[in-house]
Amino acid sequence: MEVRTLSPSIEELPERSIGPRKQHALRSAIAHFLHEEPAYAHLPARIDVVAIRLTSPPEIQLFIDAFR
């Protein structure tokens, strides 16, 4: 799970701030974990994103399996 928080003064959506380099790093971390912990290798893996805008009240969105 990746959590992104942005202040209301930034126009970009929090979920859009995860670029290709970060996506690659997250996928590499999952691959490394599954290599080190083979007991979990048969389970499906996904990356969820929680996007938080610090408005009043805060806006919180969950993106399940965000990069598929």
Image (cartoon, helix red, strand yellow):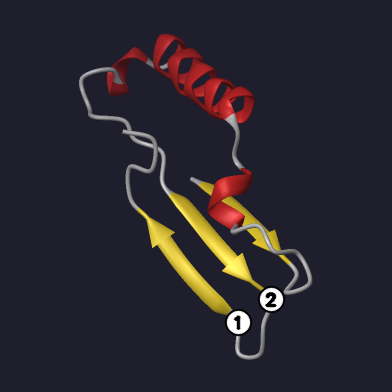
Q: Nearer the viewer, residue 13 or 61?
A: 13
Crowd around label 1: few <14 · some 14–19 · many ≥20 (10 Å): few
Please give the name of the residue rendered at 41% of the width and 38% of the height, measured from the top-left corner. Answer: 47
Relative to 50, is 17 on the left or the right? right
Specify the quadrant of the image occupied by residue 19.
top right
Looking at the rendering, in which quadrant would you find the C terminus?
top left
Relative to residue 66, is residue 60 depicted above or below? below
Task: Give how far across and how far down residue 39 sits, in percent.
Answer: 29, 19
Q: Which mark is residue 58?
A: 1
Alpha carbons under labels 2 and 1: distance apart: 5 Å
Please give the name of the residue rendered at 54% of the width and 52% of the height, measured from the top-left corner. Answer: 15
Relative to 15, is 11 on the left or the right? right
Say which amino acid is labelled 1. Pro
Relative to 65, is 51 on the left or the right? right
Q: Are marks 2 and 1 in contact (CB under 8 Å)?
A: yes
The residue that disc 2 covers is 54
Q: Nearer the viewer, residue 43 or 5?
A: 5
Task: Give how far across and how far down residue 63 sits, in percent.
Answer: 38, 54
Q: Which mark is residue 48?
A: none
Please give the name of the residue rendered at 33% of the width and 13% of the height, measured from the top-left corner. Answer: 38
The secondary structure type at the circle numbered 2 is loop
Task: Give how far across and how far down residue 55 sits, in percent.
Answer: 67, 82
Residue furthest toward the bottom?
56
The secondary structure type at the circle numbered 1 is loop
Relative to residue 60, is residue 1 depicted above or below? above
Say which amino acid is labelled 2. Leu
Relative to residue 60, is residue 23 depicted above or below? above
Task: Give how far across and how far down residue 53 sits, in percent.
Answer: 63, 71
Q: Nearer the viewer, residue 62 or 11?
A: 11
